[in-house]
Image (cartoon, rainbow, N blue to C red):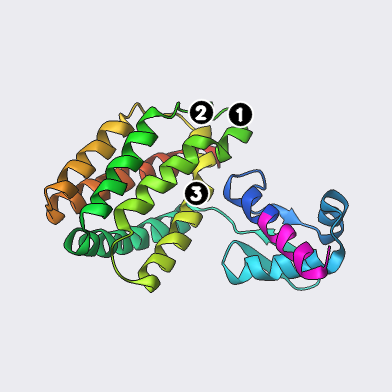
Amino acid sequence: MDAGSRTERAYQRLRQEILVGELAPNERLRVADLEERFELGLTPIREALARLASEGLVSMEARRGARVLEASPAELADLMKTRREIERLCLTESIKRGDSRWEAEVIAALHVLGRAPLPDFADKSAMASEWEAHHRRFHSALVSACGSEWLLRFWNQLVDHSQRYRKIRLAGPLVARDVQAEHQAIVDAVLRRDAVAAVALMERHLSDTEEAARTALQQAR
């Protein structure tokens, strides 16, 4: 395996572990420890950490290695406020520009998500489960017709960072929500081409998720 392949493997593995919470917020990332685990070499680990730092998932510390980006109520509020703004732009443009094939993908993604069993989130391995993939596909389908690669790039980065808070949220008290009904209501508004209603429903959906994560963060402190 060449150095580039080892760096890519290290990057993908570290990124996944950060996003699903296996590497906790603010956890120290020692290059020697990671190399012992991954057996990919010190240089690929360092290069992977630098790449993750450029994405804002890792903070580099002079002569001390790196840490997973810290989770905080302030960072969460900033993240989710920005996500709602980007989501509003993407969703509004998708409703304006989307064709029948886009509608079909949204309906199909919702259908598949609704048939996927909710995973046992007490098991950390379930964080990268089939349900998570279907959930990401559904939300991605809704914004996919916005017509802007830059907006979609920002959207994907924000969703990745939002995912870091999922394990924190699920570790706290779970508030009963009919998430499938929330998704269905959003789709109904989208298919009516009612951008105002769809955006309002999406903002409520994301705000409820933010509030649950904030409560869990405060209780963990």
Which quadrant of the figure contains the N terminus? bottom right
Which quadrant of the view contains residue 174? top left
Q: Look at the image and give the residue range highlighted in magenta.
A: 1-12
The amino acid pointed to by label 2 is Pro
Residue that mark 1 sits on: 123
Identify the residue shown where x is 11% and y is 52%.
Answer: 194
Residue 24 percent across, percent down from the top left: 64, 47
Q: Which residue is mark 2?
A: 119
Secondary structure mostly seen in magenta is helix
Q: Are marks 1 and 2 in contact (CB under 8 Å)?
A: yes
> In the rendered image, which quarter is residue 183 located in?
top left
Tag 2 or tag 3, which sits nearer the N-term?
Answer: 2
Residue underneath mark 3: 163
Using the rendered image of the protein, determine whether residue 120 is visible from the camera's viewpoint.
yes
Distance, label 3 to label 2, CA atoms, is: 15 Å
Residue at 36% in and 45% down: 138
